[in-house]
Image (cartoon, helix red, strand yellow):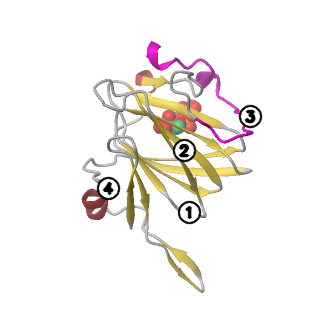
Amino acid sequence: MNVVKTSLEGVVIIEPKLFKDDRGFFLETFQLKRYKEFAGIELSFVQDNYSRSSKNVLRGLHFQKRRPQGKLVRVVRGQVFDVAVDIRKESPTYGQWEGVILSEDNQRQLWVPPGLAHGFVVLSDLADFEYKCTDYYDPSDEGCLMWDDPSINIVWPKGIEPILSAKDKTALTIDDL
Ligand SMILES: Cc1cn([C@H]2C[C@H](O)[C@@H](COP(=O)(O)OP(=O)(O)O[C@H]3O[C@@H](C)C(=O)[C@@H](O)[C@H]3O)O2)c(=O)[nH]c1=O
């Protein structure tokens, strides 16, 4: 597998080794020892999530305040633009963002350590999104950062018309978090 550093401290893109043959392909989507050694993932995962979304659905940008979740995210079907925003106040890259295309074709994964906000927009007709979390979901602890906060200025793919949940429509700016 290949691990690519990003501009955000601790956020890495993981490119698992893909084995193709006449039948199709095979890959390991997580392996404790290797993901620890090469991607720096020291924490244990306690929850796996799976969501399906149609084109232009934008989920995020989400985080938990008291019990932040690290997330190892991937796309099983379709294509998304996946985004992490550094909202760790003590971080040298506070307020900065990183975006990456994750798709069934590139089989890339993004490791988003605890403390960042995370979200994605769907670029294909349908996207199946799967991720492992290092802490349990707690709706009372959840925070939402505005996907289009002007002070963060995420450059989303051109032409998207985001479909948001009611919760994500009332998200806060980074200054108001
Ligand atoms: C995230 C989550 C949701 N749910 C429930 C609550 C709600 O009724 C329904 C849909 O929840 P949401 O609208 O929050 O789902 P969604 O917008 O997909 O939330 C997710 O977005 C991405 C970007 C993330 O990074 C995730 O951590 C998570 O916040 O599923 C759980 O039961 N467990 C969970 O872990």
Q: Marks 4 and 1: CB-CB under 8 Å?
A: no
Q: CA distance from mark 2 to mark 1?
A: 13 Å
Mark 2 residue crowding within 10 angstroms, few (<14) / some (14–19) / many (20+): many
How far apart marks 4 and 1 lie (CA) works out to 18 Å
- How many angstroms separate mark 3 from mark 2 (CA)? 16 Å
Residue under the point 52% across and 31% down: 61
| Quadrant in which the C terminus is drawn | top left
Determine contact: label 3, label 4, CB under 8 Å: no
Image disc number at residue 106: 1
User: What amino acid does circle 1 point to?
Assistant: Asn
Mark 4 sits on what residue?
39
Measured along the vertical axis of the image, is residue 165 above or below residue 111? Answer: above
**Image check: 123 left or right of 155?**
right
Q: CA distance from mark 3 to mark 4?
A: 34 Å
Q: Tell me the distance, in whole angstroms, between the alpha carbons under discs 1 and 3.
A: 24 Å
Q: Secondary structure at mark 1?
A: loop
Label 1 environment density (alpha carbons within 10 Å; few <14, some 14–19, many ≥20): some
CB under 8 Å between callouts 2 and 1? no
Q: Secondary structure at mark 4?
A: helix
Residue 161's label in the rendered image is 3
Residue 82: mark:
2
Q: Earlier in the sequence, mark 3 or mark 4?
A: 4
What residue do we see at 56% from left, 50% from top?
Answer: 129
Is residue 173 placed above or below 158 in the rendered structure? above
User: What residue lies at 38% left-to-right and 40% top-to-bottom?
Assistant: 8
